Amino acid sequence: LTSVEKIAKLTDKPIEENGSYLLANSEKGISVEVKNLSFGYTEQQKILNNISFAIRPGETVCITGTEGSGKSTLLKLVSGSYKEFEGSLLINEVPVGNYNLASLRSQTGIMLNELDIFHGTLLENISMGNTEIDVQQIIPLFREVGLHSFLASQKDGFDTWLDPTGKRLSRNVIHKILLVRALAGNPKLLLLEEPWLGIEQPYQDQIKKMLLKNFPGTTILVVSNDVEFAAQCDKTIDVSGQDGLSQKLPN
């Protein structure tokens, strides 16, 4: 009965609306422009209220704010997950609703805390069907996030089968796999929620350095209240305020 209820929750969800515009390949990253955007999961309560900002191609931006201020919701909006918002949201100067979602997401790496492991091999959980992602591209990412010892301990390596929702894996390992999934494939837009959360300190530093230095030509939005990381980004966007948004450059 529990399984039937869970299936019903999925099948009852509306199918995502798709535009027809295909996101062009670019070496310089993706621009994001938000003008007077407001959004709420219910009509009675707005999570994001009249915010505006502009992110140039290739910039690294830290999104900060108090709990429940809409940081992860903003990432979902940029990914095209929600269309019922007020104001405008432009990706490469085109309204996000015009894009074919498969085209947009093929160039987007997404890591949200609500995402999880599915029943498949370790490689399948990272590549997500993208045949252009190969093992040699993934191995350096495993070293950076601290997954190399986990890989070495699996007798089937990348062919190791993972259980649904990552059962029998620690949350630390799941988090690292989801991070590598987002980073693999040279995405032109990265949307990351707390990418180093719960990861050992040496690897936290490596991940921050990697995001700041190793992805030229990729536009990166990171949700984090890490002051040191925010100071090294091109922009910091604070969504804590209810009326508008604070956008500032680091000193």
Image (cartoon, rainbow, N blue to C red):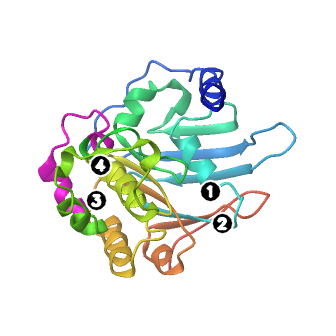
- Whether tag 1 and tag 2 are in contact, CB under 8 A, the answer is yes
Crowding at dot 4, Cα within 10 Å, few <14 / some 14-19 / many 20+, comes out as: some
Q: CA distance from mark 2 to mark 3?
A: 25 Å
Q: Secondary structure at mark 3?
A: loop
Residue position for label 1? 71
Amino acid type, callout 1:
Lys
Identity of the residue drawn at 20% across and 63% down: 153
Residue position for label 2? 65
Give the x, y percent position of residue 155: 16, 54
On residue 149, which mark appears?
none
Quadrant for the N terminus in the image: top right
Query: Looking at this view, is 125 or 30 the one in front?
Result: 125
Amino acid type, callout 3:
Phe
Amino acid type, callout 2:
Gly
Give the x, y percent position of residue 168: 41, 55
- Whether tag 1 and tag 4 are in contact, CB under 8 A, the answer is no
Q: CA distance from mark 3 to mark 4?
A: 11 Å
| Residue 59 shows in this picture | no
Q: Magenta segment, which residues?
A: 124-142
Q: Secondary structure at mark 4?
A: loop
Give the x, y percent position of residue 99: 47, 26
In the image: residue 138, left or right of residue 251: left
Residue position for label 4? 28
Quadrant housing residue 66: bottom right
Residue position for label 3? 215
Crowding at dot 3, Cα within 10 Å, few <14 / some 14-19 / many 20+, comes out as: some
- Camera-near label (4 vs 2) is 2
In the image: residue 164, left or right of residue 183: right
Q: CA distance from mark 4 to mark 2?
A: 28 Å
